[in-house]
Image: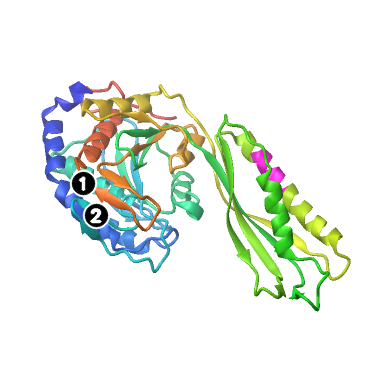
Amino acid sequence: MKKLIAMPAVQEALAFLKEDDGQTLKEQLEMCGIPAPSHQEKDRADYCLKKFQEIGLEDVHMDEVYNVFGTIPGKGTGPRLMLAAHTDTVFPAGTDLTVRKEGNRYYCPGINDDTRSVAELFSIARAMKKYQIQGQGDIVFCANVCEEGLGDLKGVKYIFGRDTYDGFVSIDNPVPGGIVYTATGSRRFRITFRGSGGHSFADFGIPNPIHAMGRAISRIADWQVPQAPKTTFNVGVVEGGTSVNTIAGETSLLLDIRSDSPQELERLTQEMRLAADWAAETENSRWAQGQPMQAEVVQLGERPAGTQDKDCQIVRAAWDAAEVLGMEAQLRDESSTDANIPISLGIPAITVGRGGNEGGVHTIHEWFEPEEAYLGPQKNMLLMLALSGLDDFLDYQLPKRG
């Protein structure tokens, strides 16, 4: 990696990225004010499209789901790579997105995750264009949609369902030197219980969907799961009911299951279906009156699990890119990110950290401090050039697939 940073054009680009830090922050703060809940990223995608065009990337376009692309073509036959950051945030429409500054700290929901990372895409692209740096293969910059929650990785699923890449890097980790190299899988479900409903006194004795939901939650809460492979479950939302003196006609819960093991995901999926059916049947058998109630299970999302060797080439490149800049590299092996999709397909992929200090992610108190924030784009530019190969520097170059 020292050979790479000794190249004159790379040195100039690294210096530019430090100088460009103010512009990167400006764009980060501008994007903060553009609402972008999952499945509603069009306005922010338009902003990214305009930025890619202004920078002068080639083949700038937006696809049908609002992923935005721009390319710096390679000058050889090296691997085709993607550097991505997601445009959606966890915050619903109507959230106050006013940026507040206190000292050197900026506050705004979504200011980091993943808004900062998208701004770093722009800075890296500007640096490479300004100093005419081209890898051996194409480097595609992508601002993708629907990473968060029930977005279910729709953007990256759409990309890899229609195109192929030899390597993938997502900027989406709160630790600047962080490297996520495994893919924690997840499945999300809505379990709905439906009955006839009625008055709590006049119709007492009919099956109660809320009681059935309570039975299901109690059974789920008693699940036993392994520590390794790490496996978790969570009932995160419960809905239903009309009033204190009404037997609800319908109620539902949202369940999140996560594991590093595909087998554990499948086992808990079957346990969940058994719990839903058992809860409905038990509630029906408890009462002799009224129509039997029903349980319905709907899968809302699935993120595939996968893994790769922690010493593989793409991980070593990310580690060395961080260390050569004096950053502390950290392997972070338990996470669910856009990299899940390519990892599950056997494509070298990682999720890496962005620059600056941050906290309060996924809360309305989210904050960002731009202390040495330029190190994020510096590191990630070095990583992409190492994976692509630059001139005769091929130490970390990824192989072309098929």
Task: Report the residue at 27% width, 43% height from top.
Answer: 357
Q: Amino acid at mark 1?
A: Pro
State the residue at coordinates (24%, 57%). Answer: 29
- Viewer-proximal residue, 357 or 9? 357
**Quadrant housing residue 384:** top left
Instruction: Name above or below for residue 86 compared with residue 211.
Output: above
Question: Toward the viewer: 229 or 214?
Answer: 214
Q: Which residue is mark 1?
A: 370
Q: Quadrant of the N terminus?
A: top left
Residue at screen point 30% across, 54% down = 111
Q: Is residue 168 left or right of residue 139?
A: right
Q: State how far apart marks 2 and 1 are (Cα).
A: 9 Å
Which residue in the protein does label 2 denote?
A: 106
Residue 271 lies, in percent from the top left, at: 71, 44
- Check disc 2 and give the amino acid type: Tyr
- What residue is shown at x 42% (from left), y 58% (from top)? 64
Tag 2, which secondary structure? strand
Can residue 365 be seen in the rendering of this structure? Answer: yes
What stretch of residues is rendered in magenta? 266-273
Assess whether residue 267 is covered by the magenta stretch. yes
Q: Is residue 137 above or below residue 288?
A: above
